[in-house]
Amino acid sequence: ASCSTLLYSREHDFPNTSIFNSKETNRRQAIGTSLHRDKPASKKMLSTYSLPRRLSPLAMAMANNVMAHTSKPRLSFALGQNKNNASITTLSSSRMHFSHSTFPPRGINSTDLYNYHQKNMRCRRFSTSNVSHDPPSSTTDGRLPKDFISTLRSLHPDLKISTNHYDLESHGHGESYHPSAPPDAVIYPKNENEIVDILRLCCRQVVDDITTITNKNTEAGDGITTVEVVSVIPYGAGTSLEGHLCFLHSGNGSDIDEIVDIPTSLFNNPGNDISDKFQKVRVKRKGGISIDMSFFQSIGEVASGDLFVKVGAGVTRNSLNAALRHTGMQFMVDPGADCTIGGMVACGASGTAAVKYGTMRENVLALRAVIPPTIVSSDIEISERNRPLVVQFGTNALKSSAGYDLPALLTGSEGTLGIITEVTLRLHPIPSNVVAASCAFDDLHSAAEAVAMIRMMGVPVSRCELLDEASVRAFNHSLYLGHGDSNKATESKSRNQQLSLQLQPMEVKPMLFLEFAGHSETSVMEDLAAAQSICMDYDGRNFAFASDEETRQALWAARHRLYYSAIALRSQDGDDGGATSRSTLVTDACVPLSCFADVVTATANDVKEFGVIGPCFGHAGDGNFHCILPMLENDSVEYKEKVSQVNANLIERAMSVGGTCTGEHGVGYGKKKYLECMYGTGGIAIMGAIKKALDPWNMMNPGKILDLKAISNLPL
């Protein structure tokens, strides 16, 4: 159906008088039904909106601000029909919208998706075009089996399943420049039993083949058994940065309809003759589904004296710490975004506090997960033999030397080995004394050398962040976003004062931000003094520190605001063209501390020499650093190639000194080409053997980390 106007928000009502341009005269009445993720439509939810043909810049700014400060997307929209067939106006939950013309087709492989992105980076905040609300059609046969959803509903009548276009689009991308590649359905399970049945139905032998396998009268008439595989991607909060959530087929796309030799033991009913070790099977990819874990919200009790808590995979980091506040304990891994715990485990997240408290790998004691089935079944065959496994890895003990480290196996697996449902996390006491400090340096290399010496001297810093000159310049720019308009600058400064943060522009020099925490004020001040002495040895100046919460926040404001300040460096007035998180490349690499100063300095020089815009900064205490490189829709191909070259140089430079291509963002499909350079053919073969053992049909997030065909022939 054609729609006149579509308002897409996050549970906020926008009064017409405040967000719509008062000069806009061409208004229309659109009567629609509010559709909500958690509530069915009802007559009581009917509402009337008076909407303009297009949103004003003020409306877009307000919408972006609301969405940036809303942690959990709860999507609602109003659909209305207009006799004039007016165009759709969309506010996207990710602050950008891909019109149907810019969607890559379902089933696109990773290589073609990258090329598609290079030619069609059309990242817009808003799109106004005459389109229907039907999902875009696929150019391949990668669609769900015709009875997939109906079978699920018959097994679980209350299971929430969405094929809404906007749910699909929002689950087909993370917070990165990688283009959206949506699944065919979004499913919201509430327990492990539902996940078990979902995964069992995602790998099935075609029914007709089972009854006729011996007489060679199969679907294609060639006597080859057909197995339909539905790809599965677990979904947390959608904050990943390396294309983890894009729906891809594995490998180069040839396994969409491929004939392979597989062990007969992988069939629940292999036929009358099982003497042959292998049999030919036609593997048909039949679309993909996103498993949204938002209903897994359990938070266990913390017993007196214990240092762990059990939480559901859908619990977010901030909500967990809010629930733990009364215990005096806290979960310390802080990646910045309000990620889900399951997503943080899957991507091996870390963040600013990793220098003291470690990454997710050190903070996961145990986990529960659903592992995909290895035995193929059909609609009419349900047995314990082909049921996916629900496994418990690890214990509640703070250490263990029993067997393989299985929790570590799934940590960083990015949804390619199974679906994490529950995690047992290590907790730490909330420190009673915290002091924040900052120090300026004349050059980036000296600041980085000071960091290495602080670590070498064993000074126990809780956080250690390094910002280059461009980062400080971005912060100063964010304080006065009026672009020369004195009235807007005054308003911006007034808003900062209302926040009780007396923020002032900083001297444009490389800055080091430190935090110290401990059980006594004396010990914390001793650590602070030791770090200050080292900074002075490396020509640091303007060393400042504070212990009260408000001043600490102001002192660290440049670091806290860096992400959005960096993107705002390429903001533009008007309706289109401004950079967003969906058009920004965020690099990620980690190197040994002895090489940190040289590598981060060389990267900052690359940014200057290539003439691209973006700051370099890092979690300097553990050698992890990033660049934030925002791009515009109308940037030239040459400029985008320069951005890509900065990223490539950074990664190659990091690996050349024994570092890694990713310290905390993960591999996804954006960085898998670098893994063989890091680990060699043998390392990749072992990873492939693990993948083949746990997910032989390659249904779990195919095309991420490794390129594997179904039942691929690996050296092991």
Image (spheres, grey):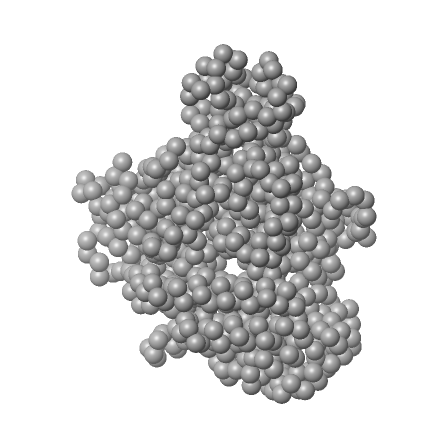
> Residue 467 versus residue 555: which sits nearer the camera?
467
Quarter of the image that includes the C terminus: top right
Residue at the image position 27 percent from the left and 36 percent from the top:
1
| As drawn, 375 above or below 365 | above
Asked whether residue 558 is in view, the answer is no
The mark total stands at 0
Left/right placement of residue 349 relative to residue 87 reads right
Q: Estimate the x, y position of residue 703 in percent, counting from the top left.
A: 51, 44
Left/right placement of residue 256 relative to residue 542 reads left
| As drawn, 256 above or below 440 | above
> Residue 239 versus residue 657: which sits nearer the camera?
657
**Which picture quadrant has residue 371?**
top right
Asked whether residue 147 is in view, the answer is yes
Q: Estimate the x, y position of residue 380 in percent, counting from the top left.
A: 54, 17
Residue at the image position 52 percent from the left and 82 percent from the top:
509
Q: Estimate the x, y position of residue 640 in percent, counting from the top left.
A: 38, 64
> Residue 426 versus residue 4: which sits nearer the camera?
426
Left/right placement of residue 570 relative to residue 24 reads right
> Residue 153 versus residue 172: which sits nearer the camera?
172
| As drawn, 530 above or below 95 | below
Residue at the image position 69 percent from the left and 60 percent from the top:
358
Q: Estimate the x, y position of residue 130 in percent, counting from the top left.
A: 24, 45
Residue at the image position 54 percent from the left and 41 percent from the top:
708
**Which picture quadrant has residue 177?**
bottom left
